[in-house]
Amino acid sequence: MRKLKNYKPTRFMAEGSYYDKDAADHAVCFIEKFCCHTKGTWDGKPFELIDWQEQIIRDIFGILKPNGYRQFNTAYIEIPKKQGKSELAAAVALYLLCADFEPGAEVYGCAADKDQARIVFDVALEMVRRSPLLKNKMTIQASQKIMTYNPTGSKYKALSADVANKHGFNTHGVIFDELHTQPNRKLFDVMTKGSGDARMQPLYFLITTAGNDTQSICYEIHQKAKDIIEGRKVDPTFYPVIYGAEDDDDWTDPEVWKKANPSLGVTVGIDKVQQACEQAKQNPGEENAFRQLRLNQWVKQAVRWMPMAVWDACAFPTDKSELEGRVCYGGLDLSSTTDITAFVLVFPPEDEDDKYIILPYFWIPEDNIDLRVRRDHVPYDIWERQDLLMTTEGNVVHYGYIEKFIESLGEKYNIREIAYDRWGAVQMVQNLEGMGFTVVPFGQGYKDMSPPTKELMKLAMEKKLAHGGHPVLRWMMDNIYIKTDPAGNIKADKAKSTEKIDGAVATIMALDRAIRCGNTNSASVYDDRGILFI
């Protein structure tokens, strides 16, 4: 077992605060004396804290303000799976319940649903049952997920996000397990905002693996933790710990695994991680799950469809001046008036050595760009300054401006057809037809979307695409969530994709027309060899 040999207080200790070794020792000794492991290889053995766990316990419970109360009221611990999160959370809950010198303490274990809420509670319950001293002083209502520490009348109760009444709490401790699974912020707000005001040193212990929803309460707290770690924000009451790989780290490198997994070789064997990595290499669909669960990286969705290394390998330069006069096909995804509108041109190859060239264009409303940057944590403002997307006046997308822009593109390029999603496009379609464009409706179901979506992946893997590395389109490709029907047909799912994919959808529609029609009116590639299944 890896032990902490030379403890140094966290760098987030505030001016005037001090480290009380006795207070820290009290917490460490309670956990190691009265708590035990309840599963796997370590089942039944005393809970000897691993070095990273002991660092957290000593920092939280040993660093005190000048008035003698704890400096940190919120601890955010983000770490990959199988590192001992549940055991640590259960031990903290029991300490707050039994040994924190708080009469009538209310400790709550919170999670997204009843099953998740039971995990930490059941681990704590098993620890109690295996400790004669704790068991004799505890009243357990297992069916209601409540245990009471009789000497102080303190209670520990498991709650889930679907509990109807979550008000009236006087919390001393809150354990949030897997915060990234919270469906919304309601439970978090109720349990952390004002519920502990009557307590002198409440503790909100948030422990989680990285998620995939950047609009969630967990991502909000994750960003705050990062800002504090990197010096952009200061909050002396907030204790941040994030173990994980950086976005540009090599996810196949064992050294990266060690950095992200502080319990590697103790609670989880490196062979298990190696095995999971090999599976992800062989099946690109598992890459994101590996990154999220094993390396604690925030990913766009649980299953990544387009491997970004494959997409990036197609970032061949595109020269717009050389494309003037060439045959091309457009894909138009209007989305909503307050959202991103995408128009993508795809130029079919002129010979066997040529590639399908992709030129994307994007628009958002000018008035809400700053709000979008703050809300979505997406650099729309930088992209605008770099001419990678355009803005239209007002707080909605100005379709008339886009029509004029497409008309100007038609003067440069030979746009044979424009494919469009039928939704919300009636007036623009009429206007584009009035300008002389051939406009064709494009269904968004499996029948129409599956063949070109599979072709897009095939062409990317064969390096027969050239997209110039456009950052906005790359971001959208990385956001795609793919749905599959029983027959193996696929399509991009906007509802399940946590961020925007409008440009990807427009690309798929334009690619379909480019493949089918090419530079002439010859037969479709689909007619030559049938629909590709990969």
Image (cartoon, grey):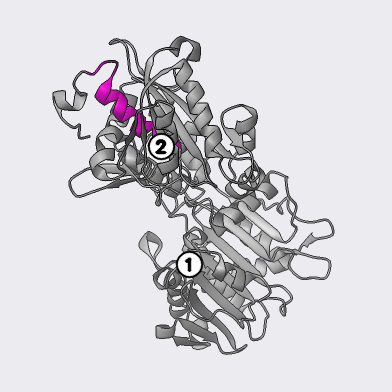
Q: Could you classify mark 2 by the number of other residues whose Cα lies within 10 Å: few (under 14), some (14-19), or many (20 or more)?
A: many
Residue 429 disc label: 2
Q: Quadrant of residue 377?
A: top right
| Disc 1 crowd, CA 10 A, few/some/many (<14, 14-19, 20+) | some
Q: Earlier in the sequence, mark 1 or mark 2?
A: 1
Secondary element under disc 1, as helix, strand or loop, is loop
Does residue 4 appear in the picture of this structure? no
| Above or below for 310 versus 379 | above
- Residue 445 percent across, percent down from the top left: 28, 45
In percent of width and height, residue 395 lies at 62, 46
Asked if the magenta segment contains residue 518, the reply would be yes
Q: Main secondary structure of the magenta part?
A: helix
Left or right, 258 with respect to 153, comes to left
Q: Is residue 517 visible?
A: yes
Q: Which of the two residues, 45 or 430, is positioned nearer the viewer here?
A: 430
Question: Residue sitting at 72 percent across and 45 percent down?
Answer: 232
Q: Classify residue 155 as left or right of residue 117.
A: right
Q: Which mark is residue 29?
A: none
In the rendered image, the vertical position of residue 327 relative to residue 399, given as above or below: above
- State the residue at coordinates (42%, 74%): 122
Q: Amino acid at mark 1?
A: Pro
Most extreme residue toward the front is 434
The residue that mark 1 highlights is 46
Q: Element at badge 2?
A: helix
Q: Quadrant of the C terminus?
A: top left
| Left/right of residue 469 with respect to residue 523 in the rendered view | right
Residue 115, percent from left and from top:
39, 71
The part of the chain drawn in magenta is: 503-521
